[in-house]
Amino acid sequence: MSNSHSRSLGALENLMEVVASLRSPDGGCPWDLVILQAQIASESEQFTMAEIAAGITEKLIRRHPHVFGDAEINSVDEVNENWEKLQKSLKKLRR
């Protein structure tokens, strides 16, 4: 893992610790006990930060087949055309 990724991971972990402290019923902030939705969902076991990160990662990869897949795209116009195709196929799946 690169140094940059390590720093980013450390920053995310630090953010999560700060949010958990703010949300703590023992010494946290009363105002923050009703916001910060990711922490709230995590506490009620609806989803975790890891699941959020995994979902975002999957979505970014799925939306960029010209970077992470075998789609060959050489211009902004082609990116836009491919985006429209992806959206149409997603709409069909949702029906």
Image (spheres, rainbow, N blue to C red):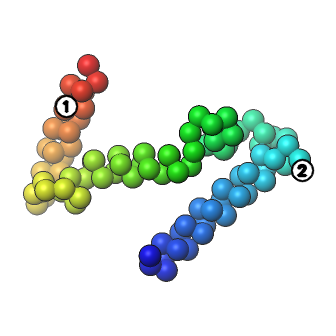
Q: Residue furthest front?
A: 45
**How far is disc 2 from disc 1 in space, using C-alphas?**
50 Å
* Residue 55 falls in image quadrant: top left
Query: Which residue carries the number 1 mark?
Result: 88
* Vertical order, 27 against 94 (above or below): below
* Among the 4 quarters of the image, the one containing residue 94: top left
Residue at the (63%, 37%) spot, across then down: 45
Which of marks 1 and 2 precedes in the sequence?
Answer: 2
Q: Amino acid at mark 2?
A: Gly
Image coordinates for residue 12, horizontal then vertical, percent: 59, 62
Residue 25: x and y, percent? 85, 43
**Which x, y percent locates residue 8?**
53, 69
38 horizontally vs 30: left or right: left
- Which quadrant is home to the N terminus? bottom left
User: Which of the two residues, 92 or 54, is positioned nearer the viewer here?
Assistant: 54
In-front residue for pair 12/48: 48
Mark number displayed over residue 10: none
Task: Please tell me whether mark 2 or mark 1 is closer to you in this view.
Answer: 2
Residue denoted by label 2 = 27
Q: Residue at x 27, y 47 (%)?
A: 63
Q: Secondary structure at mark 1?
A: helix
Residue at image coords 63%, 62%: 13
Say whether residue 65 is visible.
Answer: yes
Q: How many marks?
A: 2
Residue 75 or 30: which is nearer the viewer?
Answer: 30
Residue at figure coordinates x 59%, y 34% from the top left: 46
- Does residue 76 appear in the picture of this structure? no
* Crowding near the residue tagged with mark 2, few <14, some 14–19, many ≥20 C-alpha atoms within 10 Å: few
Q: Mark 1 belongs to which amino acid? A: Lys
Residue 91 found in image quarter:
top left
